[in-house]
Image (cartoon, rainbow, N blue to C red):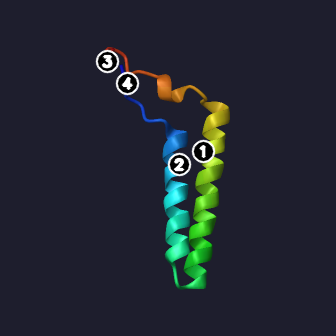
Amino acid sequence: MTSLIQDAASDYRHRAKEARAKATAATDEATRKSLLQDADTWERMARYEDQHNPQRHLWQRPGQE
């Protein structure tokens, strides 16, 4: 049985990783800085999810067993 509600923290960490990869490839300093700020925001959101919804990934929609 798999969860039907996505693990938000994992999703946010994935988005942070993508933003950091884009920042590494960016040639414009302003773009790089913006992408790194985005990555930091995604990481903060992941930490928040871990603290406030630690088992969210285990939730199931009613009737979807």
Residue at image position (60%, 83%) is 29
Crowd band around label 2 with a 10 angstrom C-alpha radius: few (<14), some (14–19), many (20+): many
Inter-mark Cα distance, 4 to 3: 10 Å
Question: Between disc 1 and disc 3, whose residue precedes?
Answer: 1
Question: Between disc 4 and disc 3, whose residue precedes?
Answer: 4
Total marks in image: 4
Q: Which residue is mark 3?
A: 64
Inter-mark Cα distance, 2 to 3: 25 Å
Q: Name the amino acid type tagged 3.
A: Gln
Q: Residue 12 — which label?
A: 2
Numbered disc 3: secondary structure: loop
User: Quick check: 4 above or below 40?
Assistant: above
Q: Name the amino acid type tagged 2.
A: Tyr
Mark 4, mark 3: which one is toward the viewer?
A: 4
Q: Which residue is mark 1?
A: 46
Give yes or no for contact between labels 2 and 1 (Cβ–Cβ under 8 Å). Answer: yes
Residue furthest bottom as drawn: 28
Residue at image position (61%, 47%) is 45
Give yes or no for contact between labels 2 and 3 (Cβ–Cβ under 8 Å). Answer: no
Residue furthest left as drawn: 64
Q: Name the amino acid type tagged 1.
A: Ala
Inter-mark Cα distance, 1 to 4: 21 Å
Q: Which residue is mark 4?
A: 2
